[in-house]
Image: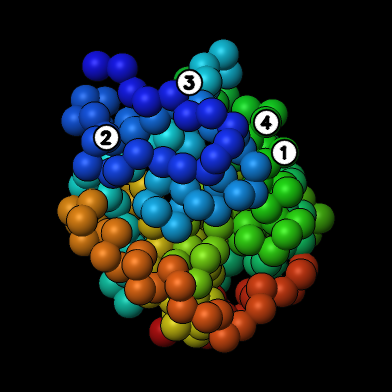
Amino acid sequence: MPVPWLEATPVQFPPLDTALEEPNGLLAAGGALSPQWLLAAYQNGIFPWYEEGQPILWWSPDPRLVLFPERLRVSKSLRKFLKKHPYSIYINRDFSSVVEQCGASRESASGTWITADMEAAYCQLNQLGHAHSVEVWHDDNLVGGLYGVAIGKVFFGESMFSKEANTSKLALVALISQLAVWDFQLVDCQVTSDHLLSLGAEEIPRSQFTEILAAAAIETATHSWPLAEDITAIVNSRE
């Protein structure tokens, strides 16, 4: 069944209950990757995901994979790694390189949805203060990290990469630890993966996800995302 085609204006999505069951969550095509489109999408439980040569595709799967910060699961081996590692962890030190590395890691596997247009769009969101990265550095080398979009008390995770063992997990633990300090309610993980399930992520119905968004995504933030701040200590102090 074809999905609705969205013109560049106005910024408007079809109802979520019209999303396809197969492929799960495909809602619409078209629109644009401007900040207005992206922020409206996230606030309504929608995200873009497409490959080079395709139109922009918008998704809202059911169920939705999420991670509640207080339910982060840290295995014994990961806990041991967190207590003794050689890395430094930063927020927003080099956002564009994180997005680039995430795209490169996906491309080496089986193609990437982080196209040049997507990369430019999220870098613009970062410049506007909406998108953020958590980065793992080994001396002057970026060896792991993740990025996503923060709206209210919800962090919408987009992608992560790891060039050395456990560095993406280290970035995630650092993110969750910082979000807990800021009283974030939810991390959106989008689609299910064994990797995220092992870290405590869980599937919830789309209806429950959008109910949480309706409250948490409009809460006024009580913090400001720092630029190039070293947050290594927040992981090192984790019990």
On the rendered structure, is 115 left or right of 97? left
At x 20% / y 56%, what residue is drawn?
207
Q: In front: mark 1 or mark 2?
A: 2
Task: Identify the residue under disc 1.
Answer: 120
Report the Cα–Cα distance between label 3 and label 1: 21 Å
Q: Which residue lies at the image location 26% right of the left edge and 65% below the top edge?
A: 211
Residue designated by label 3? 110
Give the residue type at disc 4: Asp
Query: Which mark is in front, 3 or 2?
Result: 2
Q: Which mark is residue 19?
A: 2
- The mark that comes first in sequence, 1 or 2, is 2
Q: Looking at the image, do the residues carrying marks 1 and 4 touch, with CB atoms under 8 Å apart?
A: yes
Whether residue 81 is visible, yes or no, is: no
Residue 73, position as x, y percentages in the image: 31, 67
Give amino acid for label 1: Ala
- Near mark 2 (Cα within 10 A), the count class, few <14, some 14-19 or many ≥20, is many
- The answer to which of 141 and 93 lies nearer the viewer is 93
Task: Say whether disc 3 or disc 1 marks the residue closer to the N-terminus.
Answer: 3
Q: Identify which residue is drawn at 29% across, 72% down.
A: 71
Q: Is residue 121 above or below residue 221?
A: above
The residue indicated by pointer 4 is 117
Name the image quarter holding the N terminus.
top left
Dot 3 alpha-carbon crowd within 10 angstroms: few under 14, some 14 to 19, many 20 or more: few
Q: Of discs 2 and 4, which sits in the foreground?
A: 2
Measured as percent of width and height from the top left, residue 200 is found at 28, 62
Q: Where, by quadrant of the figure, is residue 131 drawn? A: bottom right
Do callouts 3 and 2 mark residues in contact (Cβ within 8 Å)?
no
